Image (cartoon, grey):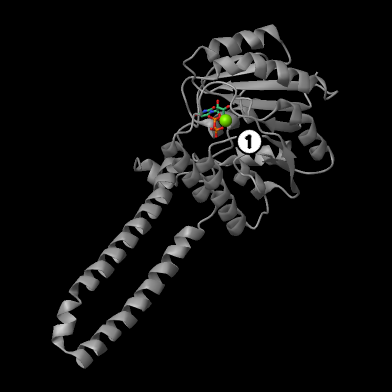
Amino acid sequence: MKPAVSVIIPVYNERDNLPELLERTLAACRGLDRPTEIILVDDGSRDGSTEWLADAATANPGEVKALLLNRNYGQHNAILCGFGAAQGDIMVTLDADLQNPPEEIGKLVAQVDAGYDVVGSVRQDRQDALFRKVFSGLINLMVRKSTGVRLHDYGCMLRAYRRRVVDAMLSCRERHTFIPVLANLFAKRVTEVPVGHAERARGTSKYSVLKLVNLQFDLLTCMTTVPLRMLSWVGAAISALSVGFGALLLALRFIYGAQWAGDGVFTLFAIAFFFIGAQFVALGLMGEYIGRIHADVRERPRYIIDRMVGETLGERAAPPRTAAIPAERAAAGL
Ligand code: UDP
Ligand code: MG
């Protein structure tokens, strides 16, 4: 029977969490009273998770499916891969480390039944390091301000989506993406529910500080070009201020004499360094966008599936590329 709900779980070196994860997720799914599939996407694990997942899919035909990627492509790409193979009309994602209790799946599905396209969740009493919570707080505030969508916890991947939203996300060809923000673009009705949060059961977080920063850049650039525009505004404001500042210096030079102006040279240095720094920040930010454009233009595959265990739809056909190469350019080999 075709599954009505697909639960998608990205797995990267989570071997010790998998038995409990599967047991609890299966129990939660069986409580839904409708056919459900659990799609476990192995994101290039090296700790034996891959083999365990393949065995689990063989042992639970119809209910558990394993998609084994040939290497590590990152959490969001792994989830997109799972979306591509999922058959349900409702899709739920969660983490493999048991920080998101699988028992909450029913709560999210109920909200989609109630008519919402996207159901986010807000972690109650979040069990993470303080710097992660502060960092998330800032990011959530920024996303809320720039998108106007009033969600409170973009980092929580325990979420449910209606199929049409997922289809729209899959038709996006960008390489760097942040699923919760992308989903909001295509959803009409969005809500969020409070969910429990546990400490990581076993193993360690897969996000180093550097990886977290990269992910936030993905979030920022996938969401908006406002920072680019802000650069121009800030640049213009700084220029205007420095014209005023120059005039002030000139006036003071005439009032207090050359001696005074000579002594002020270090102030000028300080100011110059400030502007040089600001320019580097601006260039760096532009670089982030350009890097992503570069990645998109190359159109390399987001992931490569090594093996599928259990019956899935398989990778959906990629939508046609929108821009064809004009005949004369093609003839010239360009
Ligand atoms: N994950 C993944 N690929 C990666 C990094 C993480 O599939 O490159 C999975 C990981 O196995 C887990 C989820 O994404 O199921 C969230 O990762 P983690 O718990 O390490 O993140 P944190 O909770 O520290 O934000
Ligand atoms: Mg975690």
Residue at the spot 79% in from the left edge and 30% down from the top edge: 106
In the picture, measured across the screen, residue 320 lies left or right of residue 158, that is left
For label 1, being within 8 Å of ligand 1 is answered yes
Residue closer to the observer: 192 or 137 = 137
Quadrant observed for ligand 1 in the rendered image: top right
| Disc 1: which residue | 157
**Amino acid type of the residue that numbered disc 1 sits on in the rendered structure:** Met
**Is residue 142 shown above or below 62?**
below
Tally of numbered tags: 1
Where residue 264 appears, as percent x and y from the top left, is 20, 77
**Is residue 189 shown above or below 86?**
below
Residue at the spot 41% in from the left edge and 73% down from the top edge: 237
**Is residue 270 shown above or below 32?**
below
Q: Quadrant of the N terminus?
A: top right
Residue closer to the observer: 152 or 224 = 152
> Taking the image as drawn, is residue 2 in sight?
no
Where residue 329 appears, as percent x and y from the top left, is 38, 46
> Taking the image as drawn, is residue 175 in sight?
yes
Where residue 175 appears, as percent x and y from the top left, is 49, 39
